[in-house]
Image: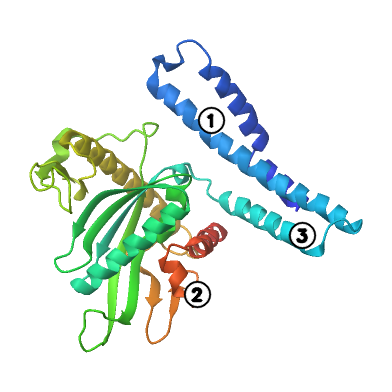
């Protein structure tokens, strides 16, 4: 384990992160630091990212050394075997987590993620399934300690949702959630069918990074088409009274984003424009990736609209990811947001293929 953590120290350039953090902290103390707000914000963001890797490495290293001390105590008869085993298991988990997180080394991986959930054909069945996915991802984000915000929700006529847009703001939100883009399939006995027949429902999930001021995306105002409407949902003084919700269409690409998160039209306009720029940036990244993939026939082609995972509740219980073949039989925890193993299996597979 000491060899592994030393390798990670070099791979993660922990010493460089420490030097850069110390240098940036000195810059924050200099006169006029806040004169250039964009530059100051960028420096503070770099300090936060560098500190994340330093703290993570030091936490793993401390867990390994704690285990080593307990192991020495055990040899002297001053610690129990269970205590040593627990310390070993904890240290091993910590180093596994650090090795996994070290694969999230693309600049966009550190950004917040925006997730769009769309119900498939099938009316109430698919809309209910889309709402189940909404709950699952909201719980996953909360378990990660992220801030989860509802940008826009369009409710179904009878039950469920037609579409939902969520923002996840936290460490490596996009880097982790990008594994979830694709079509999700549900097989169950329908609660809406009086004959209790088995139904198959589909919903799509699309995730893109929410870019910040450090990434410039030029948008021609003449290419934008704005539409304003009344916010939906339950409660709220402005609901169905003031046209605060915003729908923005980028005419050249056909991309449409909607936002009704804020209470004012101006704030929703600003958020919608940021989301559009993020979508355009992600589209460019995707096109570049497809060009790279085309040069390597052995590499799995990206299929953004493909079915990635099946959730079977009847006649047996199983959730299976078709990209990695990873599967579980206990569906309850997964639907309550325990997605780490599915996401880890996919991202590790992607790194191995690269």
| Mark nearer the viewer, 3 or 2 | 3
Above or below for 320 versus 257: below
Above or below for 323 versus 187: above
- Please give left or right for residue 181 compared with residue 234 in the image: right
Above or below for 231 versus 299: above
Residue that sits furthest to the bottom in the current view: 195
Residue at screen point 84% across, 57% down:
79
Q: How many numbered marks does the figure carry? A: 3
| Mark 2 Cα-neighbour bin, 10 Å: few <14, some 14–19, many ≥20 | some
Say how the picture is coloured: rainbow
Which residue, given by chain and number where applicable, does mark 1 sit on? Answer: 47
The image quarter containing residue 216 is top left
Task: Please provide percent x and percent y for residue 153.
Answer: 22, 54
The CA distance from mark 3 to mark 2 is: 30 Å
The CA distance from mark 1 to mark 2 is: 39 Å
The image quarter containing residue 96 is bottom right
Residue at screen point 42% across, 17% down:
34
Task: Please provide percent x and percent y for residue 267.
Answer: 22, 35
Task: Please provide percent x and percent y for residue 95.
Answer: 66, 53
Say which of 253 and 34 sits in front. Answer: 34
Q: Say which element carries label 1.
A: helix
Name which of mark 1 and mark 2 comes first in the sequence. Answer: 1
Which residue, given by chain and number where applicable, does mark 3 sit on? Answer: 83
Tag shown at residue 328:
2
Residue at screen point 14% across, 41% down:
244
């Amino acid at each position: 384990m000491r060899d592994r953590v030393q390798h990670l120290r070099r791979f993660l350039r922990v010493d460089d992160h420490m030097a850069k953090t110390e240098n940036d902290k000195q810059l924050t103390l200099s006169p006029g630091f806040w004169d250039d707000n964009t530059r100051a914000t960028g420096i503070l963001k770099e300090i936060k990212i560098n500190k994340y890797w330093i703290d993570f490495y030091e936490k793993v290293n401390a867990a390994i050394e704690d285990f080593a001390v307990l192991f020495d105590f055990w040899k002297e008869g001053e610690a129990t075997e269970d205590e040593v085993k627990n310390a070993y298991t904890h240290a091993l988990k910590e180093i596994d987590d650090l090795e996994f997180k070290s694969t999230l080394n693309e600049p966009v991986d550190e950004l917040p993620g925006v997730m769009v959930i769309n119900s498939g054909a099938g009316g109430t069945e698919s809309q209910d399934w889309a709402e189940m996915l909404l709950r699952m991802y909201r719980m996953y984000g909360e378990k990660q300690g992220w801030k989860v915000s509802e940008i826009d929700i369009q409710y179904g006529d009878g039950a469920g949702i037609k579409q939902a847009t969520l923002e996840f703001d936290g460490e490596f939100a996009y880097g982790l959630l990008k594994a979830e883009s694709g079509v999700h399939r549900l097989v169950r006995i329908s609660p809406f069918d009086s004959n209790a027949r088995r139904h198959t429902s589909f919903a799509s999930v699309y995730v893109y990074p929410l870019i910040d001021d450090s990434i410039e995306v030029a948008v021609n105002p003449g290419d934008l088409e704005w539409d304003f409407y009344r916010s939906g949902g339950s409660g709220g003084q402005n609901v169905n009274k003031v046209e605060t919700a915003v729908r923005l269409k980028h005419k050249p690409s056909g991309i449409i984003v909607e936002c009704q998160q804020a209470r004012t039209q101006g704030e929703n306009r600003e958020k919608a424009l940021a989301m559009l720029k993020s979508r355009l940036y992600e589209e460019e990244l995707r096109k570049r990736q497809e060009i790279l993939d085309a040069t390597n026939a052995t590499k799995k082609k990206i299929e953004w609209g493909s079915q990635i995972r099946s959730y079977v509740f009847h006649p047996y219980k199983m959730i299976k990811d078709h990209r990695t073949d990873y599967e579980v039989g206990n569906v309850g925890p997964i639907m309550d947001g325990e997605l780490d193993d599915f996401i880890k299996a996919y991202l590790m597979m992607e790194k191995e293929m690269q």
